Amino acid sequence: MFQGFGDPTRLIVGQTGDKKTMDNIRKDLYLDQPKWKQFILYLDDVSPICIHTKTDIVKKGLQGLFIGGNIKLGVKIPYLGKSYQTKKNVGAVLMEALPGTLLLAIAAMLFATIIGILLGVLAAVKKGTWLDSSAIFASIAGISAPSFFMAIIIAFLFGVVLHPFTGLNLTGSWFDIDEVTGEKYLTLKNLILPAFTLGIRPLAIITQLTRSSMLDVLNQDYIRTAYAKGLSKNAVIFKHALRNALNPVITAITGWFAELLAGAFFVEYIFGWKGIGKITVDALEKLDYPVVMGSVLVSACIFIVINLLADGLYAVVDPRVR
């Protein structure tokens, strides 16, 4: 049983709640049940296939198809509970924040993928030159720097010191609210700093993987055959070599995209970017357990879906897989 400051019932009613009210809330949240039963009930809530009473279906607002009498078997949208702080459905809270995280992760991965592949190809083609050494040094530095550390440095440098020149804000989400009309409007310039910060580490990984894979491919017999046929250097590098070198890069891109979607916690928090990461950190500070648990579950599902999509991308990029 939760006790003291971490007690969910105390978080809900505050410090002035009486014992009877707290007991009713514990019963409503099933906190009066044994731990094993609480776990079974939670699985029943988050599972698409469930067994619920008519009262629970109405009380929780479950959406799906149910059959039976008082106790119903059903297929439903997973129910993640309600936030202790806002009393809102956790699913709705996370879905409201998901577009912000998606936008940030896509922007960061586009930046990391385009720049990383170009730098990797350049480093492989110019192996042994200062361009190769510079690309390797930059990628090692990018891998070594933690995202939360880089976020603080970049936020201070571009959002405070150089703000008169960059015009970029220290914090801000993908929309602002007009003070006069109260309407929301897009402010994508707030995306620049968090996307750049979040893209640094995957950029470093993609650069090194592309360079290593390209060096292996450039030594293959079919590359020498392509040159012997009179194809231009650009055609050989980008049409033949790069395409066959992309398999490990795709693995890195999809893996990092899943990680950025699920793990941009500190970057979102530092830059005040409204996404799942910031919502989760706020929930941790307030001990809002349903939001934290829902966020972890959604993050795990994102990892699984993106890794499945990666398997399909292999066949699209590399004909040998097909």
Image (tube, grey):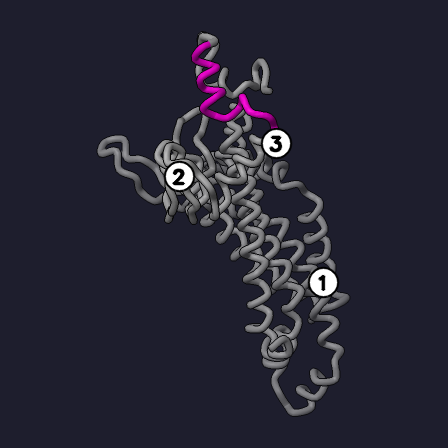
Outermost residue to the left: 181
For label 1, count other residues whose C-alpha is less than 10 Å away and answer few (under 14), some (14-19) or many (20+).
some
Which secondary structure class fits the magenta region best? helix
Magenta stretch holds residue 27: yes
Q: Which residue is mark 2?
A: 92
Against 277, is 26 above or below? above
Real-space CA distance between mark 3 and mark 2, rounded to the nearest whole angstrom = 27 Å
Query: Is residue 31 shown above or below 161?
Result: above
Relative to 198, say whether 60 is above or below.
above
Q: In this view of the protein, can residue 238 be seen by the observer?
A: yes
Looking at the image, do the residues carrying marks 3 and 1 touch, with CB atoms under 8 Å apart? no
Asked if residue 226 is among those painted magenta in the image, a careful observer would answer no
x and y, in percent, of residue 79 in the image: 45, 39
Q: Which residue is mark 1?
A: 132
Residue ID at (49%, 52%): 107
* Residue toward you, 220 or 247: 247
Q: Which mark is residue 35?
A: none
Callout 3: SS = helix
Q: Is residue 85 above or below residue 244?
A: above
How far apart marks 3 and 1 lie (CA) works out to: 57 Å
Horizontal placement of 236 versus 24: left or right? right
Task: Tell me the SS state at disc 2.
Answer: helix
**Chain part drawn in magenta:** 20-35
The three-letter code of the residue at mark 1 reads Asp
Q: Nearer the viewer, residue 37 or 87?
A: 37
Please rate how many residues cluster around mark 2, counting C-alpha atoms within 10 Å: few if below 14, some from 14 to 19, many from 20: few
| Residue assigned mark 3 | 36
* Disc with the residue nearer the chain's start (3 vs 1): 3
